[in-house]
Every structure is written in C-alpha cells, then in structure tokens.
Image: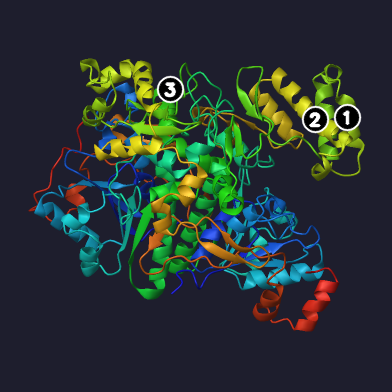
Amino acid sequence: MKALGNVRICDFTGQLAGAGATKFLAAFGAQVIRIEDPVQQGRWDILRNMPPFVDERRGPDLSGAFNNHNVGKLGITLNLRTQRGRELLERLVAISDVVSENFAAGVMARLGFDYERLRSLRQDIIYVSNCGFGHTGPYSTFKTWGPIVQAVSGLTFQSGLKGQPPAGWGYSYMDHTGAYYMAIAILMALYHRARTGEGQWVDMSCSEAGASLNGPCLLDYTVNGRRLRREGMPDSNRSQHPRMAPHGIYPASGDDEWIAIACRSDGDFARLAPLFPGAEAERFARLAGRLAAEDELDALVARTTAGRDKFELAAELQRVGVPAAAVQRPQERIDGDARTREWGLWPTVEHSNMGKVRVDGLPVHLSETDWEMRRGAACLGEHNEYVFGELLGLPASEIEELRAEGVL
Amino acid sequence: MSAALRDLRVIELSSERGALAGKLLADMGAEVIVVEPPEGDPMRSHEPFLDDEPGPERSLTWWHYNTSKLGVSLDLEDESGRESLRRLVAGADVLLECEDPGRLEALGLDWPDLRAIAPRLVHVSITPFGRNATGANDAATDLTILAGGGPVWNCGYDDHSLPPVRGGGNQGHHTACHYAVMSTLVALLAREQTGRGQHVDVSMHAAANVTTEAGSYEWLVARTTVQRQTGRHASQHVTMPSQVRCADGRYVNTGVPPTRPGEFRALLGWLDSLDLRGELPEAVFLEMGAERGERIPLARIAEDEEIQAIFGAGREAVNLIASRLPAYDFFVGAQNCGLAVGVVYSPDEVMDDPHFAERGFRVPVEHPEHGRSFVYPGAPYRFQATPWRIARRAPRLGEHNDRILPSRDDRVARHDTTGES
C-alpha cells in the first residue's frame, strides 16, 4: 500500500528548496505533477542544465542534480501565457489536493493563481508557498537562494572557528531544510483536511524556518541579553549547549584527513585519556578543569591524532564508549560505509535519457508503508500524454494540436 | 481558529535528539506529553541558563525545545513506571523516542509489545544509525554524526590546514527530527486509510548523508568530490569568493553578480548615488552590460572576453560598494537593485530585524512563576487556518503528573510544581 497513494499534487516547485519537499511525498506514493514552461524549456528550474552529468551529453534532460531532487514525479509542460494553458491548469487544480510552489513572492498571483483563485477552483485546496522571506513584510520582494537565507537567518554566522570569518555551510542547508518544512506543512495541512475537510494556504518564509533553528542562542539574547557576536565566538567545532571538552575536529594521518571526537562527561574523559599522552593529568579530570585549558587540551589531543588513521582511531575510541567519527569524504560514506549500504540509502532509479542513476534515498524506514524510488526525474513534458490524456481526458488529436500551438 | 493537530496525542520520551520533533508537533496543536526520568532530563542541565544561574527549571535549551508540551516524570526502571507508560501509550497516537537500540526491548516496551496494546500507535524511533545498523550502539553526538555523515566535509575554509567545520546549533539533531516529523505524518495519513499504526525507524547518520546537496550527488552521478571553501558552496573546482567584509566589520554574502541589463543599470545608479563611479575604472563595462539587449550569456564566458569583463566589473562594483557601506545598508541597497545578497546576521540580530518583527517572529511566552513573559523565536511556517502557536512554556519537572498519570497508586516521582527552583 502507498501511504500517500490518494494524494495528487499540482507542483510548481523547483531547485531544491521546493523540489525536495515533493520528492519526499512522491517516494510515499503521492502523484506529483510537476509543471514547467515549454517556452523557456524548463529554465524555471536552473538545475535542469546544471552538472553533474553522467557522460558528455548536456541539456535540460540530463542533469544529475535535477534528477536527484525530482525522482518519481511526473513532468508536464504548460504555457500559462496562453488562455488555453490557463484553462488546462484550472482543470488540473480542480482535481488536485495540493498546489505547491517556491517562486519569489507574487509570481503565482501574477500568473493569475493566488490562493483565492485556487480556492475558487477547488474549495478545499491546500496551497503551500515557500520563498525566502514570505509573502508579507518589508523584504517580501527580496530575492534569495540557499546561502542568502542561511546568511540572514544566522546559520552562516553560527558556523565557524574562533578568530576566523564565518565558514558558513558549504552547501544549501536551508534548501534541504526549507524543503523539509515545506513537506511538513503539506502533510500537516493534509492531516487537518482529512479530519475537518478544511483546506488552507501556508505561507512559508525560508529565513524564518532557518532562524528558528538557533533557539537556545536566541533565548540567550532575549532572556539574558547576550549576543553571539562577541570575542572568541562562535567556535562551532566546540560544544556550547551543553559544554563539552575535548570536543572538536582534529587532524589525522594523511592529506586533509580529520577525526571528530566528543567527550560528553568526566567518565568519557577517564576512558579516552589513556590514549592521549599527557591527558591523564589530574587537572583535566573534571569538566571545569578541561574548559579552563581548552586550547591546551585540543593541542594535546591533536598531537596524537595527527599520527593516527582516522578510521582506526575512531574505532579505538568507540571500543571504550567515546563518541568519535572519521570525517568521511563522499566516496567513503557512499561506497565504503556498511551503514548506508545496509540501509539502502542510495537507490538506483531509471531515467528515460540518463539510464540508471544513483540518488539520495530517505533516512527513514516505515514498517508497513515504506518509501520507494524507481523512476528518475521526468524529461520536459514526458508525461503530457498521461496527464492531459488520461487525467484530463483530452483526445490525442487535441494534445497534438496544443503542442503545435505552443500551449504544451 | 482550530489547530491542525488538535486531536493528536503524542508520548515523547525526553531526549535532546528528538526534542525538536516533539516541539514541531506540539506547536501545531498536538497534545505532546514529554516523559522524563525522575531526576529530570539531562537537557535541564544544558546552557544557557536564565540569568546564568544553573537549575533544572532555568535551562533555556530545555525551555526552547519543550514549548507547548505537558510534562510527566516516570521511572522506567521500575515496573509501576513502565505500567504507567503502557497506559499512556495505549491512549496515544504517537510514541516518539530516541532510546539506545535494545533498551525498550529489554524493558518490554518495544514496538511488538506496544502494538499488542495499541494497534493504531505510530512508534517513531530516532537513533544514531538506525535500530538494526552495524554498530547500532556506537556512541554519537551531533558533532560525530555530522562528521561521519557528510556535512562536515563540505564546510570550512579555503585554507585546508584549518579543520573542516561543524555548523552550529545541533543541526544533526534537527535534521533527524525533521525527517521524524515528516514520517510520523505520513504514517498518520496511512492510518487514516488502514486503521493501523506502524513503526518508523529514523537514522540520524542517514539523515545527515542525504542533507549534503552536491556533496552526495557529485559522487553518485559523476564520481567527483567537492572541496570546502570559505563561506560558499563546496565545489569540485575553486569558485570566486562571495563573502565580503563590510565597512562596519560585518560580512555579507554577495551572491551571484549581476547579469541582466536592468541589474547593471540599477548598480550604476547606486554607484552614482554613493558618488563611487569615479573610483571604479571598470564602470565602462557596467555601461556595456546595461546597454545589452539581454542578460550576458554566462555559458560563453570562457571564450568571450567582453562577457568576462562585464561580469568581472559587476563583481568589482558589488565588492567596492560592500567595502564602503555597513553590512545592513549594503544588503538592503543591493536587494533594491534586484540582487540576491544577504547580510550575515548573528542569530540574535534576527530578533531585532524589522522584517522579522513585522511578521511576528518575536513571540512572547508567559512564565507565570516569574511573573513575566520572555520572547521566543516564532513560526517556521504561517498556516492561515490553523496557526502555529506556543500554547505554553516548557513543563517543569513532573508538572503534570497529577493531571495525566492514571493513578495515584503508581510509585512515580512527585515534584513540587509550584515553587521557585
């Protein structure tokens, strides 16, 4: 059984911040119909032409990035500049449960499909919009992408070493996470509708979702008046809530190899100390003493780690019950990690143009209605016949005509 | 207005790993009962503290992650405590727990035991590696999860003699919680059709692994490895810096330089208004960008020197202005030119920002025992019909024992719920 087999989504999402949400829902059986613009050949979504590619071929139906975020969805083209295109969208909305999009604020209204219009087409429609700053407020017209959201929400600043500029996140953490909140919003709205019959609009501001991920730090300011912008802060390889020491990322043998070690308690320290010459001094036995000499202790730990293999030392620390992990490279965690392999975390999907491609799976398993990923992302307009023919009942001749007229 | 999850009852076994998942459900109206051991959850000893004084009712970490929840204390090492939990679970829709693999089984409280008394229950387990993983009981923290799971490899500085960086804020916990909530809701929607519950196994390690964007798919698709860079995406090839220090010492992310004629025109106007055009020898190329009929084609940048010059001039202009203005003024000014840039706020600065304030991100929450309210971060999403809402401050230890636990005969820990800590 498909958990979401009775859910149809009229999907305008793109990139990762939107597409990631409907990818999750499609994996549980939702029918996600992704709408793209035939005139711009899919350029609503910049990822359609972005690397990586499986071979030397290039083009909107060959991007590994786009494929990764759009597994299992249907793809149609529809020119909303035309009257006929807008009519077909109206019919599609009328048979959909959800309309999802992550355009800049105001784009859906300009296309003629704001919430009030959507609701007139289907009274209990769920409309979830996700943009950088939401649909109201002084920044509602501002443009963003993942790193901009991360900067303004405080996440970039939160990531860095003492005395250095912000390191930030080396990827769009808030595109992933914005997609997670968008999926949660869609699912909560579906749950509410299942109980009450009531649909609604959810206005998501990705930067608000991001800001909410710094809770203790925000309360330290609103309650205690303490700001994070202060001498020696942030220092995010260390642990602030709770304090731990040693707690950091230390060099291991080899070029650019590292190991993470977290000492949660005096007990952890007593068990790790024998592995690090000099650590057994009495003054390090209690947390207060270790925090008082944090830099010295880090240097002491690093002296030992620098000569050790990251995997071997991590295993040795785990044997005495201390949290430790090699900083894994992509190849190591994808192809060399028994845990991700056993989990089935990298399923292979079949893409019509790219062939078999591995993608990010899901980090959950449901005992009765688990997820499945088989079909790759849709090529541009790949499912026009199915959606306009089977779902909307247009004869093949009319679909051909619409294509010739540039509506599809 | 009603709440989206109004009729949902969730039993949460307290843990820093899963607390955000319970909060996300509770702030949308679910009745979430967080179950702590009699001595209180360890999170109560986590910094920061109200007025910097430690105390079980003073941890701001506990306050933040447990809003809108009810709280009881139970000793699961004791049979009467376990019986109380069984009764709670029998009347619940969801059990959310982060116990070490094997503990609930040893206590007779695992999914097979609970399914027998609560066939409609959705039992959600968040564990570091998944309940049946190789080395399922290895020790883990947010740091080691993000290091082993991929995010850390992507984050840090151009200078690779500096260690890679774990982003702050316990985001490894958060990512697992996001997947836990998504999956819980999927299981609840499935139950609407089947009438049956199920078990949901969430792996923190797997959650980190699929939250690294190109870090994973560059390898999956093309067997290429991204390398970390200061303040921007890790990449197979070195890319231009996009983080600039402004006149007030704060940083901005300058995003992608202008490519459209309108953006070049706006940028020229901004330079003029700041009287800076004369300081930019490349301004002539901005004029060329402004006069073109369409955006400069970046696909041809490698072979076209004019495109290189125009694109480079846009970056120089942005960097010049950033170096002359305070970060906030640069952010607003550049956005008004249509450029996607951002001020690198410290998290607390968000709470003073006019946009966040106007949208109601500052949410006062009453703390009756202190006779005042404190300001909390607000909604991650704006539900129009069923608004997100903090129903109450986090529970004090054992605060709702009398109201919730089935019988006074249970030998559960009782605590004074009225006094000041």
Q: Residue at x 45, y 69 (%)?
A: A3
Q: Which residue is mark 1?
A: B285
Spot occupied by residue A244 in the image (x, y as percentages of width and height): 32, 28
Query: Is A5 situated left or right of A143 in this image?
Result: left
Callout 1 secondary element: helix
In 3D space, how far apart are the residues under numbered discs 2 and 1 (Cα atoms)? 9 Å
- 1 vs 3, front mark: 1
In 3D space, how far apart are the residues under numbered discs 2 and 3 (Cα atoms)? 42 Å
Spot occupied by residue B151 in the image (x, y as percentages of width and height): 49, 40
Is B362 or B173 nearer to us in this picture? Answer: B173
Question: Do labels 1 and 3 touch, CB within 8 Å?
Answer: no
Residue B20: image quadrant is top left
Callout 3 secondary element: loop
Query: Is B80 situated left or right of A402 in this image?
Result: left
Q: Residue at x 61, y 34 (%)?
A: B232
Question: Do labels 2 and 1 touch, CB within 8 Å?
Answer: yes
Q: Amino acid at mark 1?
A: Phe
Question: Do labels 2 and 3 touch, CB within 8 Å?
Answer: no
Q: Amino acid at mark 2?
A: Gly
Q: What is the chain identity of the residue bearing mark 1?
A: B
Is B177 or B231 nearer to us in this picture? Answer: B231
Q: Residue at x 56, y 64 (%)?
A: A349
Q: Which residue is mark 3?
A: A225
Q: Which mark, by number, is residue B312?
A: 2
Spot occupied by residue A366 in the image (x, y as percentages of width and height): 38, 63
Quadrant of the rendering where the N terminus of chain A is positioned? bottom left
